[in-house]
Image: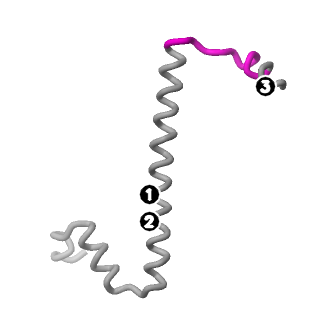
Amino acid sequence: MNRAEGLMTVKELLIEELEDSADSLLVEVLDYLRYLKFRQAEDADDLREARAALADARENGTVSWEEVKAQAGL
C-alpha cells in the first residue's frame, strides 16, 4: 500500500479498482458481493433464532433428547 492508498477509505480503494476492471470481472465481483451480503443476513437471522431459542429454554425449560426422538417417531 502506498502513501496515497493509506489515506483512502476502503470504499474509495474499491471504486478505484472497479474503474480499472473489465466488465466480465465486474459481473463476478457483483455476484460475489451480493452473495456475501446474503450470507451475512442469513447469519444474523440464525443468531436471532438461536438467541430466541435460548431465551425460550430459560423460560420454559428444555425437552429431553429421548422425548424429541419419540415425538419425531425415531
Residue at 29% x, 76% y is 15
> Is residue 64 rendered magenta in the image?
yes
Q: Position of residue 45 (x, y in %)?
A: 48, 41
Residue at 69% x, 15% y is 64
Looking at the image, is mark 2 or mark 3 earlier in the sequence? 2
Question: Would residue 35 appear left or right of 1 to someone viewing this image?
Answer: right
Please tell me whether the stretch drawn in magenta is mainly helix, strand or loop: helix
- Quadrant occupied by the N terminus: bottom left
* Magenta region, residue range: 59-69
Q: Mark 1 — residue?
A: 37
- Identify which residue, 8 or 49, lies in the foreground: 49
| Residue 33 image label | 2
Q: Secondary structure at mark 1?
A: helix
Vertical relation: 15 (above or below) 56: below
> Mark 3 belongs to which amino acid?
Ala
Q: Mark 3 — residue?
A: 72
Q: Are marks 1 and 2 in contact (CB under 8 Å)?
A: yes
Q: Distance between the Cα atoms at labels 1 and 2?
A: 6 Å
Q: Position of residue 58 (x, y in %)?
A: 50, 15
